[in-house]
Image (cartoon, rainbow, N blue to C red):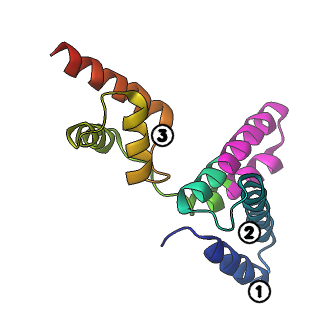
Amino acid sequence: MALTEARLAQDLTAAMKARDAQRVAVLRGVIADAKHVKVERRVSELDEADLVQVMRRELRKREEAEEYAVKAGRDDLVTQNRAERAILESYVPAPLDPEELDRAIRDALAAGSARQIGAVMTALRQQYPGRVDGKAASELARRILSETAAG
């Protein structure tokens, strides 16, 4: 199911009816962040890739908070952050595995994307919204581009 603002609103309503306080808090935070992005970009609706980006940013916040909680010995906060991450992960599409990413980069190059890293990354983001790990993709794309240039 596609990630949309309407889906988030429906899930928030369902969580409120179910009295799931943790899910309500997480979804309210995500919806608020999405509204900030909308205002910042001056758009009326965010596409799925933008919403996934908001979700991933929230996931990184929880991971960081969990690390600090572990260092501080706060098991209650560790448990809370893990539960919140599980909620957020249910909305984020699975990232491309290394073989899929390799195939996608080679397909983008074969389809005529310019032999520049930026063009390949743009093609990947458009074809696989929210499923591409930028760092891994750029490293792999650089390696593939250097192989094809050398070979």
Circle 3 SS class: loop
Amino acid under disc 1: Lys
Q: In the rendered view, tell whether residue 67 sits above or below residue 4.
A: above
**Mark sitting on residue 17:** 1
Q: Please give the range of residues in magenta.
A: 57-84
Residue closest to the far bottom: 17
Amino acid under disc 2: Arg
Mark 3–mark 1 contact, CB under 8 Å?
A: no
**Mark sitting on residue 23:** 2
Q: Residue at x 24, y 39 (%)?
A: 112
Report x, y in % for residue 97. 36, 44
Q: Nearer the viewer, mark 3 or mark 2?
A: 3
Q: In the rendered view, tell whether residue 54 sits above or below residue 140.
A: below
Report x, y in % for residue 27. 73, 66
| The quadrant where residue 80 appears | bottom right
| The quadrant where residue 3 appears | bottom right
Report x, y in % for residue 43. 68, 62
In the rendered structure, which disc, 3 or 2, sits on the residue that comes first in sequence?
Answer: 2
Residues at marks 1 and 2, CA–CA distance in whole angstroms:
11 Å
| The quadrant where residue 29 appears | bottom right
Residues at marks 3 and 2, CA–CA distance in whole angstroms:
26 Å
Q: Residue at x 44, y 47 (%)?
A: 125
Assign the C terminus to one quadrant of the image: top left
Q: Nearer the viewer, residue 59 or 117?
A: 117
The residue carrying mark 3 is 133
